[in-house]
Image (spheres, grey):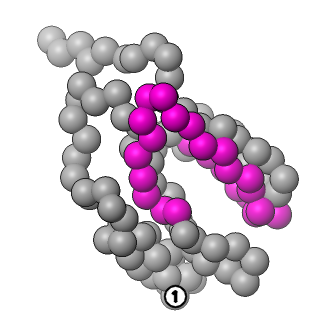
Amino acid sequence: GSTGWLRSVLTGACGIMQSSLPATEQKWDSMDLSFCVREPFPSRTTGTTLVYGCIQPTHSFSLTSRMAEGGIIFSDGIVGDAIEFNSGAIVTISAAEIQGQLVAS
């Protein structure tokens, strides 16, 4: 309910505040990949030590899911493009080799 939601919001905010990275908007021409955990809810078996960060183009990191069911990963707020990320699944995240281009008309 609302208590769990508030705990997730506060955990995320605290994670950003404790980060060495500035919580500012990323520049359009940056090659870095910024990320945040949408609902970093700490439970008895999971932690929330990494909720916000930046991956440089030459680096990557891997995550292992501990969520029994209902875990997903998605990008740019498009939940319809989500992939399942349940217990035991491992994902490696890095910046794409090909950079997208913004076209304004």
Q: Is residue 32 above or below residue 8?
A: above
Q: Residue at x 42, y 36 (%)?
A: 56
Q: Can the viewer see residue 82 in this picture?
A: no
Q: Residue at x 25, y 57 (%)?
A: 22
Q: Residue at x 15, y 12 (%)?
A: 105
Q: Nearer the viewer, residue 99 or 9?
A: 99
Q: Is residue 33 above or below residue 100?
A: below
Q: Can you tell which quarter of the image residue 80 is in?
A: top right
Q: Can you tell which quarter of the image residue 32 is in?
A: top left
On the image, the x and y values in percent for residue 14 come to 38, 76
**Residue designated by label 1:** 3
On the image, the x and y values in percent for residue 39 come to 53, 65
On the image, the x and y values in percent for residue 7 come to 49, 82
Give the left or right position of residue 70, taking residue 3 as reference: right
Mark 1 packing: few (<14 Cα in 10 Å), some, or many (20+)?
few
Give the left or right position of residue 38, taking residue 20 as reference: right
In magenta segment, residue 61: yes
In magenta segment, residue 91: no
Q: Residue at x 28, y 30 (%)?
A: 30
Q: Can the viewer see residue 22 in this picture?
A: yes
Give the left or right position of residue 57, taking residue 20 as reference: right
Give the left or right position of residue 78, taking residue 102 as reference: right
Q: Nearer the viewer, residue 28 or 31?
A: 31
Per the rendered image, the range of residues in magenta is 50-74
Q: Is residue 102 above or below residue 83?
A: above
Q: Can you tell which quarter of the image residue 69 is in?
A: bottom right
Q: Secondary structure at mark 1?
A: helix
Q: Residue furthest left?
A: 105
Q: Nearer the viewer, residue 82 or 22?
A: 22
Q: Is residue 92 above or below residue 37?
A: above
The amino acid type, in three-letter code, at marker 1 is Thr
